[in-house]
Amino acid sequence: MVANKESMPDEAEKQYAEKRRSRRAKIARMLRVRPSEPKDDHFDDLPVSINASKEGILFRTRRAAYYPGMRVFVTFPYSSPHDPMNCEYVAQVVRVEKLPNERFGVAVNLLMTVNYSASNPGTSGRS
């Protein structure tokens, strides 16, 4: 289900602001998004975020494979596959909007971290 909305992301932010528990920061950072369930065709998307909060990220993409309820792995921020600062999350797509120029705005809710080593103080992440 894709909302037919030809508005800019700022207008979408205002419309959905009342559902948010924390403030969003406008931040343009690369992220990596992959499906987490085998029923979805595999892809590796590297979009750029529009904004982010502790609970979610809004990003812009050309990929039309996203749908509300889809479970994905999100690495944010992402710079390279071997960056020790990468933090991977399990997330769920909560909104997909059609944007101008054959793009989509995708909002994901971050459900849990998968491998964030900073959650274990005292471990350096080295073997």
Image (spheres, grey):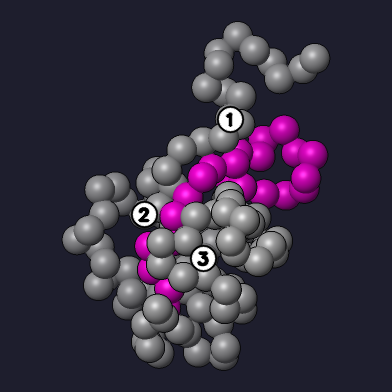
- Secondary structure at badge 1 equals loop
Assign the C terminus to one quadrant of the image: top right
Residue 61 marker: none
Q: Position of residue 113 (x, y in %)?
A: 51, 36
- Secondary structure at badge 2 equals loop
Image vertical order of residue 42 relative to residue 86, above or below: below
Residue name at image x 54 percent, y 61 percent: 49
Q: Position of residue 97 (x, y in %)?
A: 42, 78
Q: Classify 10 Å Cα crowding around label 3: few (below 14), some (14-19), many (20 and above).
A: many
Assign the N terminus to one quadrant of the image: bottom left
| Mark 2 lies on residue | 24
| Mark 3 lies on residue | 59
- Secondary structure at badge 3 equals strand
In the image, residue 85 lies in the stretch drawn in magenta: yes
Q: Which comes before the other along the chain, label 3 or label 1?
A: 3
Residue name at image x 67 percent, y 35 percent: 85
Q: Which comes before the other along the chain, label 1 or label 2?
A: 2
| Left or right placement of residue 96 versus residue 35 in this view | left
In the image, residue 27 lies in the stretch drawn in magenta: no
Q: Classify 10 Å Cα crowding around label 2: few (below 14), some (14-19), many (20 and above).
A: some
Tell me how far mark 3 sits from mark 1, CA to CA.
21 Å
Image vertical order of residue 27 relative to residue 3, above or below: above
Question: What residue type is disc 3 on?
Answer: Phe
| Left or right placement of residue 95 versus residue 104 in this view | left
Point out the residue furthest to the left here. 18
Q: Which residues are magenta?
A: 75-97
Residue name at image x 57 percent, y 73 percent: 65
Question: What residue type is disc 2 on?
Answer: Arg
Q: Nearer the viewer, residue 50 or 116?
A: 116
Q: Can residue 26 be seen in this snapshot?
A: no
Q: Which comes before the other along the chain, label 3 or label 2?
A: 2
